[in-house]
């Protein structure tokens, strides 16, 4: 555990180095240019904001992974409105990437969950489905009831993941190709966070993928059948 923690800190520091170096270089270049105009400063501020965004995302992700089981506030959550809100928030990104998002809910299902964390997990999965897609592609989200649980499929028509890399994509800091990550600016933490959150809820996540055709992420969560559940008992 000690060794793993050391590795985690080393990887995290490594991820911070590039954005910090970018910021330093930009600031030094402009500071040393006596002819720098207001336009140059404005242009640089765009790069700096983008880099700060990246650092902010990274620090939020690291915090979430480091916090472990703390701060999980479970309450009755209906999956459909939760997913609808997550999708709504990702619509601008989907438009940018020319990707359509479809939601099919076959059964209304409640789970006992931390809505914020669960939203974060599905947000990461759908976000990946958009960014690793092709122009004109789609992300199909399907919710169905299985015995004692609810299954959520997040299926995309993107580039897919080679089978030899598939077992590693949930590892912290693992990226399939450095070039992919560069376009997206991810640190390889999104899926590690998803798995962490799903496990905190007593569920599991699996994936199947075909290169050139797309990927299918399957989340299973234990469900609460509405008829046998009294929401007054949740206390929140
Ligand atoms: P990142 O934040 O860098 O995207 P993730 O943990 O979310 O990191 O994903 C890990 C790796 O798995 C990424 O490098 C990406 O290449 C690959 N990946 C994740 N989701 C998909 C997907 N839907 N389609 C293709 N590749 C994916």
Image (cartoon, helix red, strand yellow):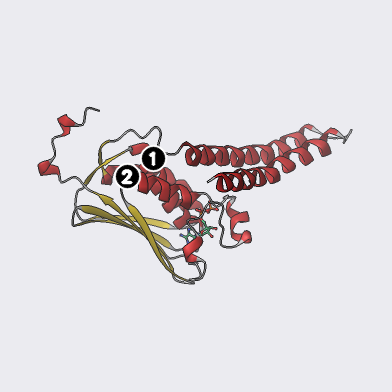
SS label for mark 1: helix
x%, y% of residue 86? 38, 44
| Residue 5 visible in the picture | yes
- First-in-chain label (2 vs 1): 1
Residue 174 vs 24, above or below: the answer is: below
x%, y% of residue 74? 29, 35
Q: Are marks 2 and 1 in contact (CB under 8 Å)?
A: yes
- Could you say which is closer to the camera, residue 2 or residue 199? 2
Task: Answer with left or right where residue 202 lies relative to residue 40.
Answer: left
Whether label 2 lies within 8 Å of ligand 1 gets the answer no
Task: Answer with left or right where residue 124 lies relative to residue 18.
Answer: left
Residue tagged 2: 201
x%, y% of residue 13? 65, 43
Local crowd at mark 1 within 10 Å, few (<14), some, or many (≥20)?
many
- The structure residue drawn at horizontal position 21% and vertical position 31%, both measured from the top left corner, is 234
Asked where in the image residue 214 lies, by quadrant, the reply is bottom left
Asked where in the image residue 117 lies, by quadrant, the reply is top left
| Residue 91 visible in the picture | no
Q: Quadrant of the C terminus?
A: top left
How many numbered badges does the structure rendering display?
2
Of tags 2 and 1, which is closer to the observer?
2
Residue tagged 1: 117
């Amino acid at each position: 555990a000690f060794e793993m923690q050391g590795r985690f800190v080393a990887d995290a520091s490594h991820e911070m180095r590039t954005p910090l170096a970018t910021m330093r270089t930009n600031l030094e270049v402009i500071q040393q240019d006596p002819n720098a105009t207001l336009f140059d400063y404005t242009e640089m501020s765009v790069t700096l904001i983008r880099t700060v965004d990246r650092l902010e995302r990274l620090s939020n992700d690291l915090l979430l992974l480091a916090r472990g089981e703390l701060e999980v506030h479970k309450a009755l959550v209906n999956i459909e409105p939760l997913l609808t809100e997550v999708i709504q928030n990702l619509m601008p990104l989907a438009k940018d990437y020319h990707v359509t998002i479809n939601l099919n809910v076959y059964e209304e299902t409640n789970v006992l969950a931390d809505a914020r964390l669960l939203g974060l997990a599905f947000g990461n999965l759908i976000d990946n489905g958009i960014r690793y897609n092709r122009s004109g592609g789609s992300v199909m989200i399907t919710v169905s009831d299985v015995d004692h649980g609810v299954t959520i499929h997040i299926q995309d028509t993107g580039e897919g993941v080679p089978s030899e890399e598939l077992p590693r994509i949930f590892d912290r800091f693992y990226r399939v190709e450095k070039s992919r990550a560069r376009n997206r600016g991810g640190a390889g933490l999104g899926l590690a966070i998803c798995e962490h959150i799903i496990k905190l809820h007593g569920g599991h996540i699996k994936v199947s993928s075909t290169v050139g055709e797309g990927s299918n992420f399957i989340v299973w969560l234990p469900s609460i059948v509405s008829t046998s559940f009294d929401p007054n008992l949740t206390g929140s």
